[in-house]
Each structure stands twice: as C-alpha cells, then as structure tokens.
Image: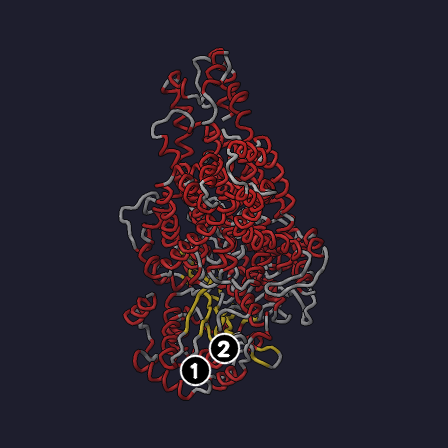
Amino acid sequence: MTDVALKSRLDKRPIQEPTPWDQLKTNKNWLGLWFMLPAAAILILFLAYPLGLGVWLSFTDAKIGRSGEFIGLENYEWLQGDSTFLLSVFNTMLYTTVASVIKFAVGLYLALLLNERLPFKAILRAVVLIPFIVPTVLSAIAFWWIYDAQFSIISWTLKEMGLITANIDFLGDPWNARWSTIFANIWRGVPFVAITLLAGLQTVSPSLYEAATIDGATPWQRFRFITYPLLTPIIAVVMTFSVLFTFTDFQLIWVMTRGGPVNATHLMATLSYQRAIIGGSLGEGAAISTAMIPFLLAAIMVSWFGLQRRKWQQGGEND
Amino acid sequence: MTDLTRRTLVKGGTALGAAAALSGPALLDWAKAWAQASPWKPEKGAKLSMLRWKYFVQSEDDAFVKLIDAFTKATGVPVQIARESYEDVQPKASVAANTGTGPDIFWGLYSLPHLFPQKCVDMTDVADYLGKKYGGWVDSAVKYGKSGNKWIAVPICYSGALINYRLEASKKAGFSKFPDKTDAMLEYAKAMKAQGTPGGMALGHASGDGNTWVHWALWAHGGQTVDANDKVIINSPETVKALEFAKALYDNSIPGTASWNDGSNNKAFLAKEVYWTNNGISIYVAAQNSAKDVAADMDHAYFPIGPVGKVTELHLMYPALAMTYTKNPQACKALIAFMLEADNFNPWLQSAKGYLTHCLNAYDKNPIWTADPKTTPYRDVAKRSLTAGGLGSVGEKAATAIADFIVVDMFANYATGRENAKGAIAIAERQLKRIYR
Amino acid sequence: MTDVLAEKAARPQRALADTSAADHSEGMSYLNSLPRRLVTLYLPLGIIMAVLLFPFYWMALTSVKPDEQLLDFDVYSPFWTWNPTFKHIYKLLFETEYPIWLWNTMLIATCATALSIFASVLAAYAIVRLRYRGAQWVGGAIFLAYLVPPSILFIPLSTVVFQYGLFDTPFALILTYPTILIPFSTWLLMGYFKTIPFELEECALIDGASRWQILVKIVLPLAVPGLISAFIFCFTLCWNEFIYALTFISSTQYKTVPVAIVTALVDGDVYRWGSLMAGAMIGSLPLVILYAFFVEHYVSAMTGAVKE
C-alpha cells in the first residue's frame, strides 16, 4: 500500500528529487528495527525466553538455585497421580467457571443499570471502578478480616438478625472457603466487566431501540436482538481477559487462605508457588505452570477470533 | 528511627526483675571487655547483615536490638537486621546459599542449616566454647547443630509449643489440671465441648501450631514418617491410631480449625472463644497486656503422653548459621558467641517472657522460669523436644516434608472427612517417598 | 436480572408503556414511572454499590478502631466507633518501615512505567506509521504477549533474574514489570496514533523532518490523552503486582507495600488488624487520588485494553 501512496505522491510532486525517498524506503525497515528495539529486548529477555525456559524447567528436577538434570516427563507423571495437583486443577476450573459466569451476569446487569439516565452518573461510574483500582492484595486483606473465623462481621450480623446460631466458618470449611474466595474474586472483577461493557453499550445508537419499540418489541426482545448482538464482540474480548486472569489468579488466594484449608482452595498458580518457591522444587512448580499453557492458548484463540470479527488487526475500524 | 523509639521503650518501660542484667554504660563496658578477650576478632571494616524470624513478643526483639547495639559499639561492626515471618526464612536462605549473595547470618527454623551443610561456616569452636562455659548443650540441639562431627550452626533457642488452657472452665468440666494421657485428653475435649467451652488446635497450614501438635500426635501413638535409615514407614497401624485420635479431637473442637493459621488460636483464645489449644507463650504474654482476666484464668501444660509411654513433643528450634560466602566469618562467629553470653542471654531470655527457651543447660537457673510458675513448663521444652523428621535424619528431606505440610495435611484430610485413613496415609506416603527417594 | 425480564416477557401487551432494567435508551426514559424505577433501577444499583463499597468502609473503620473494640462485638457496635484512634496509623507510619515500602513502590512503579511507555511509544509508532515489513505480525505478537500471565512466568523468571544478577534489587521488578505493561500500552498507543492524521506527517516529511522529530514534535503532543491513559493504567498495574515482588525481592528494605504488609504486620502469630487495615488503606490512597483526577483517562485506558 505504501508503494501506491508513494506513487501518487511522486506523481503530485515530480520536482522532488528521489534520493531522500529512496533512502527512506531502504531505511524504513532499519528504522522500524531501531524503534522496536527497546520493547523487543524487554519482551524477549523477560517474557519469551522465560516462557521457553519454564517449559524446559518442567522436564528437569531443578531445585531453587540449583540447575537440574533432564528427567523427561517424570514431573508430569508424578503430578498425574498427585491428588493435590488434581484437586488444584478442579479448583481452578470451578473458580474460573463460576466466577466468570457470575462476573459476566452481574457485570452486564450493572452496565445496563448504569446506562440508564441517573443523577450523579459520572460519580457513580467512578465509584464502581474503585474495587478494581485498589491493589488486590490490600482488598484481599480486608476480605480476610471480613471472613475471619471468630470475628467475622457477616457472621455477627446474621447472628444478630437471628438467622444463624454459630459463626459461619468462611475459610475453614473447604466448600465455604471456595465460595468465599470466589465471591472476593467476583467482587473485584465485576467493575472491569461492567465499565467495559458500558463503554460498548454507549456505542449502540438509541434510534435502533426507538425503531424497535415502535415495532412493538418487548424489552427482552430489544435486549436479545439489538443490545446483545451488538455487544457480542466486546463481550468475547472482555470475557477472554476475565477468564484468563481468573484462571491464573494468585494474589487473592495466597493472601486469604494460602491454598488451605486442606488444599481446598489451591489454584494451579498458588500450588506452583508453594511447590517451587516454598518447597524449593522448581521443576515440579514449572510443570504445574506449564500445565496451564493449554488453557491459555484456548483463551487466546477465543479472543483472537473475537478480535478478528472486529478486524482490529487491519488497523482500521472504530466504533 | 525505629530503633530510637524501641530503645527508649526498653529504657523507660519493662524493667521486670532484670536485676542481674547489666544496662547502659555497664553493659557497654562489659561488651568492650568481652570484645578484647574474645577469641574471634572481627575483620577490619567488617559489616554484617542478618536475617532473623519475625518476633512473636515485641519485648524479645527490643532486647535483641539492644544486644546487637552493644556488639556494634564494642566492636565497631555495624549489623543490619532484617525480619521475615519464620516460614519465609527457609526459602530465602536456600536462595542465598545457592546464589552466594545475601545476608551473612541466617537465624531460622528447625533443620535449616542441613539444607546446605557445605555452605555453612564451621561453628565447632563457637559451639564448644559456649558448651564448656554454660553447662553443655541439650541433646536435641546437638542433633540439629551438628552435621557429621562438625557444628554447622549454633542453636540459639527453642520456642516451646505447649498446651494453653483455661482453668475455671476445665474445673467446671471436672478437670483440675490438663490431662496427662491422650485418652484422658479426649474425655477432656468432649467435656469441654459439651459445656460450651470448646478448644481446638490448628489443622491449617500453620508452620508452628499445626506441625507441632500433629507430629506429637503421630509420635505419641508410635507412628513415624521414616525410620532411622530414612525409609518411609508412615503406612502403619500406629499412624491409623494417631489419625483416629486426631479425628476424635477435631470432632470435639471448635469448628474451623482446618483453616487456622498460626494466629487464629491466639485471637480466639484471647477473645474467650477457645478454652484450650497449643501455642507458645505468646497468648499468655498478650493476655497479660490486653485481657488480664484471661491471663489470670489460664495455665500451661505439657502435651499428654500417648500409648508409646514417653514424651513425644516437637518444639521449634531456632539455629543461627553463617554462610560461607560471608567476607567476615570471624565477625559472624563473634556476634553469635556474643549473643549467647550470660550477660546478654539472661536479660534477653527474660524479656522474651518465656517465649524463648535456652539450649544451654546453665540457663535453667534464669529467674524467668521461676518468677511466674505459669511459665515454668516452657523451661524444659529444649530437653523434651524430639527433632524434625522423627527417627530420621535432620536434613533437607525432613525440612521439605515439614515445609510441605505433609503430616498436617494427612491429619487434616482424615479429620475433616475428606479421605479415609487409608487414602490420607497413601497420599502422605506417596509424597514422602518422593522426598526421601 | 433474568427473572425481572421473564416477568416482563410474561406481559407483552403492556410493552409500550413498560419500562425495565433492560431498557436503556435514554431517549425513552420519560416513559418510566418513578416507583417502577425505584424497584428496577435504584434498588439493585444500591445493593450492588453497597456490596462493592462495604469492604472499604470496613477497612477504614478497622484502622481507626481502638483495639479493645475490635474484638468485642458484644459491648461495642461493630459498625461504628465513637472514639476513633490514630494509634494504628501512627504505629504504621512511625514504628514500621512502611514509609520505605511506600517509597519503594512509588519508585518501582514510576521507573517501570516510564520505561514501558518509552518502549511502547517507539514500538507503537513503528508499527502504525513506519509500517516496516512484518509490522502487522509484530503487532499481533505483542498482543499475544499481553495474554501471558505472570503466574505462569514467575518460576522461570526467578531463575532468569538470578542469572542476570538482578535478584533482590529494585531492578528485578523495574525490568520485569514492563513485560506486563508494554504489550498493553503499545496496543493502547497504536490506537491513538492511528487517529492522528497522516497528512500532518507527510507535510513534515516533505519539509525534511526526521522520523524522530516528527514523533517528538507532532505525534506525541497530539497523543497526550493516550499517554496519560497508558501511564495511569501502567502505574496501577505496577502498584497492584504481587507475585513477582513476592518472588524476586527478599530484603525488607526493597519490598513493595503489597508484599511487605502481609508479612510485616503480623507479629509471629498475632495479627495487628488495626495496622494491617491502616496499611491497606494508606497503600490504596495514592492510586485512588490519582484515579480521582484522571478517572476518564483510566476508563478509556481500561476499555482500550479490550477495545483497541
């Protein structure tokens, strides 16, 4: 395309001597290289190389600070029969599925609500985002205290209301702990989904709704046949991110339960930290992280197709 | 900045019975004289950095800072102290040992020096000097401190994990003292739960409170993770008995112990939610400050004796080691020896209020152990303690097994009903076999 | 939500005068009656807001409650305190190394963000405007890098950080954070650069300006909103990062707030909830203030993260 543009430009300005242009043409790739260098250096040294190294490490028995021997698939074979690992896979699936579905539902609902005509709209929108702004660890500490086994404010309130007789053991019972951590994750993730979908909603032209209403469409039909289809691409992308970051979550779990009780809340990420950094078996930890990569690829495929639909790679197209 | 406030605190505040302790200029004179006479002369221009575990009783740390200051003034060697929660000292030390950079001295937990024995400075001269001077080392400390016939670390102290219980509620349940046999302990737990004053012990990933009691329960019934040759022998009828005992205890405890970390029982005990548990003396110390009624109505007891008929307690040992990469090995030795000299160690023990227990027999006479009879049980924890790994070696394998919470998880799996005894043991056995391969 | 809609769908004959949560065309809101809006809009919105904000209230309250009231719900109402104390905050600021951690966090976040933005500006400009051979592929690859989460990378990265000799220095974080930030900000800036008319550059090129001059004198001033968005977003991400900071830093004096607060305010087995909460609150404040000023940029950055 540049050639075409150049041709037309050259036609327009025949007086221009061609040398600087030629130079630019030959230089363009060089120039591009120089411009790309800082970003590429960082990404290759600290992202691409470690990513490959991680896969390699998973085939060794490396310990902290001690490079290991190549042991083939031994780590994976060990993990296959390791009930804690299998449990962490189950937890990760559960955590991701439940949290993502609810985040999507509540986020979409909140986006629709915020899209209504409201007083103090701007302030409301700003406030909604706060859980997303505050560092996860710090809000996780707050949740930790809210969920405390003996001094939980939730337990106390329910007791005062006469709904329960004993404290709820939020983080001590395996299933309670799972739901509690999932709730904290949803709490943190909803604003992101809501605000992003809201941005998408604002691009939907009101005239569509007016036309539909005149044709006698019910609110549900309006949502089903106008809002939802127009939002689909952005939903695909938002949910890809949401699923990906939920799947690889570490902070919330680490601060609140460290994977307890009885490993009931270990996600693959926390288990790999536990085994690699605390237990010192880098190889095994790397194998657990590497096992996450297939899921990662699946998420990337989804978002890629979501993006393709909007032709973003082509660099044009904006709503 | 922080030191200033700390030191003023120490000066102005707790002068409890530290009559024997030197202070101010006298301490400094003694320290200078010590530095003159000491066989270890710090290198010229030496600087030390030290990583220690994060204190449980603040006054202990204040005393520690004070003696480090005295060392600096006497020898001119500045010492930088960093603190980490005690389960994090081990990974940091492993990293430092392998990268060859980091703090010169690590003061960590259990068998830390045995994770990298060849990276530890030989401390035999320091250990012998101290042992001769102060009535010898207790047995378990020797086992932790020596690798082969060389001392690779100096055992500084123990931190006892004993039963903490409330008196009035126990009397009401028909027990004037905490029971000293495991069967009676079950009865006690039942009776306490029945009258609405339950207790409980951590089954979550609590490095201190969880590990100490589950290892006691396992050993008390004759179970062992490995034998003397490091062969895994966890799968035994004795282990099943221990599991059943723990489940019965769990069923008669306050709900939620499966999620407890090291802090949970302190909080619950002080808030009068829990009436018996296992812990260091930190609950009692905190109670004296913030809940005097609880302090007056509580006492400490040794763990009950199980079917094996002998003491099977596990307490937390804190060894200090110097890394071979240090540029100032003499300064490290001087500092560690200095820490354990009577003029420093006695006031330090006192300021720890019973949280720390000595490994050198001479310190049995420290007034802290008799001033308040409620602290007396903690005097003997070093003598009573077995070593991590049970019958097996104290080394990397035992340390890994403890760090991975294998035994804690086995008990928790069974007590919470997630696994039957066979399944819980099988999981633990599989992990142990991998560690001990 | 669905049951509201289902209930609506059951009465289609009133569709025209009907309003619902799903009706979000502002143009027609005059059709709504107030009571209905109360139930379908304000009530759910109020509930969601309360749930979203309660933890912060709890954080703030805990950090000013006296200790004896913290653990005693029977005597004192847990939801309020009449005698707030600044003891916890004082303790945090003057008796721990909290100010140092705050400073570390600031420093690391600032450096990592500056580095990332510098690299991203160059990369984004090259991809969008230089259109060198393979630029599109590189753009795609950078987007893919955005999808590689830290929790997969931290183990190999820790060995890499050892190899490069960066372990336990602020550089370990300053150089690794950009891997999270560059893909995102490059993507964001590409979108902004595309909106700048190409003609401006053409004229400058013909006048003999170099690419570098064009970038500095023409493109960047026009892309300021984009730069601010990228900056805010990167800064927030740095501040929020936990797993690298936990793994690569071991000395207390280099720690960042999120990591230090979890270990430092726990005395062995005693949790100082008051100071913990104060630490969490003060640690969040810089971001909240920054965000309050640039909320629009932040939102556009966030949506840019998925849109552009």
Q: Where residue B18 appears, x then y in whole percent?
A: 34, 76
Q: Camera-side residue: C249 or B226? A: C249
Q: CA distance from mark 2 to mark 1?
A: 10 Å
Dot label at residue B44: 1
Q: Camera-side residue: A83 or A188? A: A188
Q: Earlier in the sequence, mark 2 or mark 1?
A: 1
Decide: few, some or many residues near mark 1? Use Cα within 10 Å; few <14, some 14-19, many ≥20.
few
Whether residue B433 sits left or right of residue B71 in the image: it is right
Specify how the rendered protein is coloured: secondary structure
- Report in which chain the residue with disc 2 lies: B
Q: Where residue C49 appears, x then y in whole percent?
A: 40, 35
Helix, strand or loop under label 2: loop
- C-beta proximity under 8 Å, tags 2 and 1: no
The amino acid on which the numbered mark 2 sits, given as a three-letter code, is Lys
Asked if B432 appears above or below A319 in the picture, the reply is: below
Q: Where residue C79 appears, x then y in whole percent?
A: 34, 43
Q: Where residue B185 appears, x then y in whole percent?
A: 53, 60
